[in-house]
Amino acid sequence: MTCEELVDLLVDYVDGGLSAEQVGAIKQHLCGCRPCVATVELYQVTIKVTRALPKVEPLPPAFEARLRAVLAAQPGGEAS
């Protein structure tokens, strides 16, 4: 397992969506890679914090349309 492979699997690892073999490979990698341990911990904290944020109402349709238009007009911008 490389650092890049771990990053590619990070979402599924934290969500518990990997096979036992993949989890084992990640845990083995984490035993010897402090930067990846820090990445996993930061990701877990980020999820915890964002889940604790208050729920918000959707944007008013007219405002959302204007915002998407502005974003689409930016270089590399896409309205989705």
Image (spheres, grey):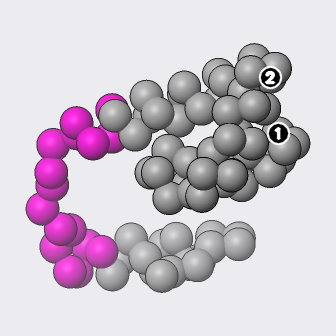
Compared with 4, 36 (above or below) is above
Asked whether, in this view, residue 40 is left or right of residue 21, the answer is left
- Across and down, in percent, residue 23 comes to 63, 45
Tell whether position 58 is magenta. yes
Compared with 8, 60 (above or below) is below
Query: In front here: 20 or 11?
Result: 20
- Across and down, in percent, residue 21 comes to 68, 52
Calculate the distance from the C-alpha at mark 2 to the C-alpha at mark 1: 8 Å
Residue type, label 2: Cys
Query: In front here: 80 or 72?
Result: 80
Taking the spot 59% from the left edge, 32% from the top edge, the residue there is 40
- Provide the secondary structure element on which disc 1 rests: helix
The magenta stretch is 49-64
Residue type, label 1: Cys
Q: Is residue 43 visible?
A: yes
Name the residue tied to disc 1. 3
Marker disc for residue 33: 2
Compared with 51, 45 (above or below) is above
Q: Are marks 2 and 1 in contact (CB under 8 Å)?
A: yes
Judged from this view, the residue extending furthest toward the right is 2
Tell whether position 23 is magenta. no
Q: Quadrant of residue 42?
A: top right
